[in-house]
Structures are given as C-alpha cells and as structure tokens.
Image (tube, helix red, strand yellow):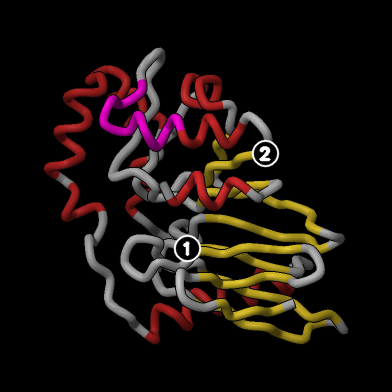
Amino acid sequence: MFLRQVAEDADIVVVLGDLFEFYHGFDHYIYPFYGEVVDALRDAAQSRSVYFIEGNHEYRMGPYFESYTGIRCVRKLSLDLDGKHVFLCHGDAFRAFSLSKLLRSRLVYSIMDLLGPDRTWRIAMQCGSVLSKKHKTYDEGVRDRFRRYGKKKLREGYDAVIIAHSHIADIESYDMDGRKKTYMNTGDIVASGTYGSYISGQGFMLRTMTYDRRIS
C-alpha cells in the first residue's frame, strides 16, 4: 500500500485530506471497508507523528478515530521543519463561502450522530455528485487562485505553504523578505500519482513515481 511505503522512512506523515470517500467519526465504530487504510495509519503512528488534516470528504473524524489510530486529526496545521515555519491545510475553506463550512456545523454533526453510520453513509453517497466532483480537470484559473492563497499565507510569515483540494499538482519558489519560500499543492495521488515530501538538506519536493521536481 502506498501509505505504508511513504511512511516507512518518514519521521512525520501528514495526510492532506480526502483520503476517504466520506468519513464522519462515530464512537466505537470504524467503517469496515476502510479497515485496511485505517490500520495502515495506526501502524504508521506507532513509530512517528501522523497528522490527518480533514478534507471536504471528512467531517469530524472524532476522538474514537484518534484514539484507535493514535493520530491527530485537525483542520489546519503548523510545523517547524529545520527552522522552516510550514503551514498545511486541505485548501477547501479559504473561500468566503464553501459548502463544507456549512456541513461542518454543530447541527449537521448532531444529525449525523443521530442517524448513525449506515444511514449517514447512504445519504452521503446519494449526495456525492453534489458535494464533490469526481474528476477535476486542469484549470489555470483554479491553479492561480490557489497560488494567490499560498502567497497570502507566505506573507504572514510562513516559509512554506502546502495544500491540496484542487487536485492540481504545483510547486513554486518565491523570494520574500530576503528568504526563499515555497508554495506546494500536492495534487492527486490517484489520478496523477503526486505527493509532497520534505528531506533535510534537500528541501521540499513534489514527487511522483517517475520524477521529482525539487525546491530547497
């Protein structure tokens, strides 16, 4: 499994969301068809820090999921890597309005909890075409909008901004305030086979099975 391979040599693993088709955490319950993936996360967390940044397919993973896997679930994350201040998020919430913000309300979570995992899953699958596009095409306008958001966060003092959501793999380097800063969108591991990595002494890389584009 890809997750196990990537985690094998990593000190820190960050999942940038949309790993699942849909996930809402329930007490003492793990979706059985996600068992292999969840167990891979749990195995990875035994010897390293693992963070799960919830995407627009995950709606409050919940304390049971965290305790079962040993990973930390968040909506955004700041890390320090070799003195670099890094900001990470899924990338679905920087617009003024997004459907995912509405669906993350306390009321919707309460309804999900009341319905239980089976009925909630069936409703989510029926609404899947509305909640998220299955296949996202390359769009320069979308790419540039995400780059602008990345630059905004870099101007706030971060040395690197790493996001996903658009499914458009992208990495750019900028000179700001006398420092070299990096924006990276990790793309889509399924469609394009891309993911991001950071190696001490080498820097941030947008990686695929066939090539690396490297920015220190």
- 147, 96: nearer the viewer: 147
The 10 Å Cα crowd at callout 2, few under 14, some 14 to 19, many 20 or more, is some
Main secondary structure along the magenta-highlighted residues: helix
4 or 94, which lies in front? 4
Residue at 39% in and 37% down: 37
Helix or strand or loop: what does disc 1 sit on? loop
Q: Amino acid at mark 1?
A: Ala
Residue that mark 2 sits on:
49
Against 82, residue 151 (above or below) is below
| CA–CA distance in space, label 2 to label 1 | 20 Å
Reading the image, the residue beneath label 1 is 164
Q: Residue 32: within the magenta?
A: yes
CB atoms at circles 2 and 1 under 8 Å apart? no
As helix, strand or loop, the secondary structure at mark 2 comes to strand
Nearest the eye: 179 or 156: 179
Tell me which numbered mark, 2 or 1, is placed earlier along the sequence: 2
Looking at the picture, tell me which residue is in the foreground, 103 or 26.
26
Q: Position of residue 79 (x, y in %)?
A: 73, 52
The image position of residue 48, as x and y in percent, is: 68, 38
Instruction: Check residue 177 for magenta coloring.
Output: no
**Total residue callouts:** 2
Where are the magenta residues, as a range?
Answer: 30-39
Q: Residue at x 39, y 47 (%)?
A: 19
Please state if 6 lies on the left or on the right of 152 as rendered: left
**Dot 2 amino acid type:** Ser
Q: Position of residue 158 (x, y in %)?
A: 75, 66
Q: Is residue 38 left or right of residue 42?
A: left
Left or right of residue 122, residue 191 in this image: right
Name which residue lies at 34% across and 36% down: 23
Vertical order, 40 against 165 (above or below): above
Outermost residue to the top: 28
Identity of the residue drawn at 75% across and 77% down: 216
